[in-house]
């Protein structure tokens, strides 16, 4: 029987060597680098040098993730980032966008830009946001909450390695990170920023981009709305628009 901390084959962080600018990719909550692989593959085909991270507690088991704090995810992100010699761009998805916002705030002088995709500021449906304070209690009464069969099938159909259960203590940690990011990191992003959001996002508040645009003080803040995409935009119907918007942003700011 596999250990709860053993990495699932295929969930490892990937590295795609290129001669162009260096890009660091950060996946979202309960997922793995497979979630951002389409972005990495596309940018690599354009010559970019691609790095990724496997966040602590991810790509192993829900039991492993249940033991992690948001600070563990940050330390894992920071350690992977600091191994890159002169990283140019950071791209974060969902909870990964929160971690990317901290990198942008604290290492902005070393970066040329940041891309925030489907940023986790609030849970959607909105009713869940209203009971978010109950999540620590739910973690005791019901440690894990199953995702829908449709979601599990979506992962399978698209070769995404992601848990089919939410570890509720870890959910609470992700909410903590969101609140801290809104107060401390996002308002301190001064480098060029691209915000991308699926209009039909079913997991985070699709109106969250308005908060980002209000809080980020950078001179350059671009926004791209994906009209037909839900949360996981990397496998959505607007994938071409997603990839081209990222590429164009990086191309403009790589100099």
Image (tube, helix red, strand yellow):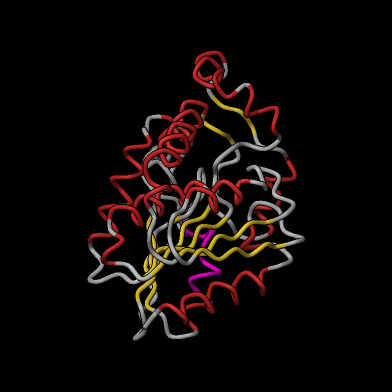
Q: Would you place residue 13 above or below residue 205 in this image? A: below
Q: Quadrant of the C terminus?
A: bottom left
**Looking at the image, which residue is at 43% across and 37% down?**
177
Magenta highlight range:
33-42
**Looking at the image, which residue is at 54% across and 72% down?**
246
User: Magenta span has 213?
Assistant: no
39, 114: nearer the viewer: 114
- Rendering quarter of residue 67: top left
Q: Would you place residue 222 above or below residue 77 in this image? A: below
**Looking at the image, which residue is at 55% across and 42% down?**
163
Q: How many marks?
A: 0
**Looking at the image, which residue is at 53% across and 77% down?**
247
Q: Quadrant of the N terminus?
A: top left
Q: Where residue 243 appears, x then y in whole percent? A: 59, 73
Q: Where residue 57 appears, x then y in whole percent? A: 40, 41
Q: Where residue 51 appears, x then y in whole percent? A: 37, 67
183, 93: nearer the viewer: 183
In the drawing, does residue 245 fall left or right of residue 179? right
Q: Where residue 105 appears, x then y in whole percent? A: 34, 53
Query: Magenta part mainly helix, strand or loop?
Result: helix
């Amino acid at each position: 029987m596999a250990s709860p901390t053993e990495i699932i084959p295929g969930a490892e962080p990937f590295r795609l060597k290129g001669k162009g600018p260096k890009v660091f990719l950060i996946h979202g909550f309960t997922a793995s680098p497979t979630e951002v692989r389409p972005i990495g593959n596309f940018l690599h085909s354009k010559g970019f040098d691609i790095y990724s991270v496997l966040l602590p507690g991810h790509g192993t088991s829900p039991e492993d993730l249940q033991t992690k704090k948001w600070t563990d995810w940050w330390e894992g992100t920071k350690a992977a980032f600091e191994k890159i010699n002169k990283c140019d761009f950071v791209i974060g998805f969902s909870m990964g966008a929160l971690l990317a916002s901290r990198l942008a705030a604290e290492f902005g002088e070393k970066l040329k830009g940041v891309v925030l995709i489907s940023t986790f500021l609030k849970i959607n449906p909105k009713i869940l946001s209203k009971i978010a304070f109950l999540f620590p209690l739910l973690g005791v009464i019901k440690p894990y909450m199953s995702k829908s069969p449709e979601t599990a099938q979506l992962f399978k159909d698209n070769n995404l390695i992601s848990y089919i259960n939410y570890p509720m203590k870890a959910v609470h940690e992700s909410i903590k990170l969101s609140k801290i990011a809104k107060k401390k990191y996002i308002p301190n992003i001064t480098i060029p920023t691209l915000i991308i959001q699926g209009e039909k996002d079913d997991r985070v508040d699709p109106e969250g981009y308005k908060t980002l645009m209000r809080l980020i003080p950078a001179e350059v803040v671009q926004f791209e709305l994906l009209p037909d995409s839900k949360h996981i935009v990397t496998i959505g119907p607007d994938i071409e628009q997603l990839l081209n918007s990222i590429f164009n942003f990086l191309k403009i700011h790589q100099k």
